[in-house]
Amino acid sequence: MGKQFYGTELKNPLMLGTAQYPSPSILADAFKMSGAGVATVSLRRESGSDRAGQEFWQLIKELNVPVLPNTAGCYTVKEAVTTAHMAREVFDTPWIKLEIIGHTDTLQPDVYGLVEGARILSEEGFQVFPYTTEDMVVAERLLEVGCEVLMPWGAPIGSGLGLNNEHGLRMLRAHFPDVPLVVDAGIGLPSQAAHAMELGYDAILLNTAVAKAGDPALMAKAFSDAICAGKAAFDADPMEPRDMAEPSTPVIGKAFL
Amino acid sequence: MTIVLNGEKVEINATSLNEVLSELGYSEAKVATAVNEEFVPETMRGGVILSDGDRLEILAPMQGG
C-alpha cells in the first residue's frame, strides 16, 4: 500500500499535467491509457466569448480523477495565496500545488516565499503540495509550517533533464521516510521516472514529457508502466551493488575439463 | 462606468459584482473573481459594489502542469 496524500491514496502514482496537448481528445486519451491518479490544473483569465475554461472543466470532470490546482506563474506570496483561494472555490478542493517562482529562466522555486505561503495556506485549512527544491532544510521548514507532502524538482520545469541531483533526492528520502515525496518537474523519459521511484519516491508529477511527445497517449502509458515498475522494484528491496563480479551460476560441482 | 476586466477596459451598467457578472454573461459559469487584487468569494459577490476604474479579474479552469 502506498503512502496517503492528505488521507487520499492514489490509484496510480502518476500525477499528470493537462497543459500543452495537441487537442482535448488527446489529453483525455493520455489519461485513459495511463490511468493517471491525479490531474493538475490551473486558473487563467476567461478570454472573450469562447468560454474555453468551461469546456475544459467539463472535460476534466469526466476524467474522474482527483484534481490538483496549481499556482503556476505566481512570483509573490500574495499572488499565490489569492490564486489558491480562487482555485479552492472553483475546483472545490483543499488541495493546492503551491508554486512560487523565484527565477524566470530556471523557474526555480522561491523557497523563502514558499515557506511563508505554505504557512498561511496551511493555517487556512489548505492541503499544500509545495513545489520545492531538494534542499533538506527548506523541507524541514515546509513540514514545520504544516505541509504533509513534499514535491522537490528533478530538474527545471519543462527541461526533460531528469534527476539533476540524485544524491539530494536520496538524502531527502532517507531523512523523511514517512513523508509522501513526489518528484515534480524536469522528467523527460520514463526511465528517469522509474529511477525516482526506485529511490523510494511515492509519485511523479509531469506534464511536458507526455504532452510534447509525438504520441502523448502512448507516452503517458509508458510513464505509467515505468512508474509502477519503479515502485515495485523499490518495494521488492533491490540488491546492493558491488564493485567486483560475483558468479551467479554455482561454482561448486563444476566439471574438471 | 468603465472598469478594467481581465486587463481590458469595458463599459458596464450594473454596479454590484453579481449583476456585473450577469451582464457580462458569466452568471452560469464556473469562475472565481477578484476585485482590485483581492479575492471575492461567490457568496460575497452581491455585497461588492464596483466603482469606476476598478480592476476585475474573472478566472476560469484552465490547463496546467
Image (spheres, helix red, strand yellow):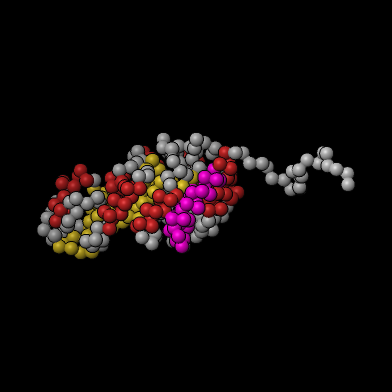
> Left or right of A47: which side holds A195?
right
Q: Could you say which quadrant of the image residue A199 lies in? A: top right
> Left or right of A171: which side holds A15?
left
Quarter of the image where the C terminus of chain B is located: bottom left
- Residue A207 lies in the magenta stretch: yes
Q: Is residue A198 above or below residue A51?
A: above
Out of B45 and A162, give the one closest to the viewer: A162
What residue occupies the far left of the structure in this picture? B13
- Image coordinates for residue A63, horizontal then vertical, percent: 35, 48
Q: Residue at x 61, y 39 (%)?
A: A237
What residue occupies the far bottom of the structure in this picture? B9
- Residue A19 lies in the magenta stretch: no
Q: Residue at x 21, y 61 (%)?
A: A49
Q: Residue at x 83, y 42 (%)?
A: A254
From the image, give the main secondary structure of the stretch colored magenta. helix
- Image coordinates for residue A116, horizontal then vertical, percent: 41, 46
> Left or right of A240: which side holds B9?
left
What residue occupies the far right of the structure in this picture? A257
Please say whether residue B64 is visible from this viewpoint: no
Number of residue marks: 0
Out of A108 and A170, give the one closest to the viewer: A170
Q: Residue at x 43, y 55 (%)?
A: A217
Quarter of the image where the N terminus of chain B is located: bottom left
Please say whether residue A55 is visible from this viewpoint: yes
- Image coordinates for residue A114, horizontal then vertical, percent: 43, 48
- Give the residues in magenta: A204-231
- Image coordinates for residue B53, horizontal then vertical, percent: 19, 60
Q: Is residue A107 above or below residue A135?
A: below
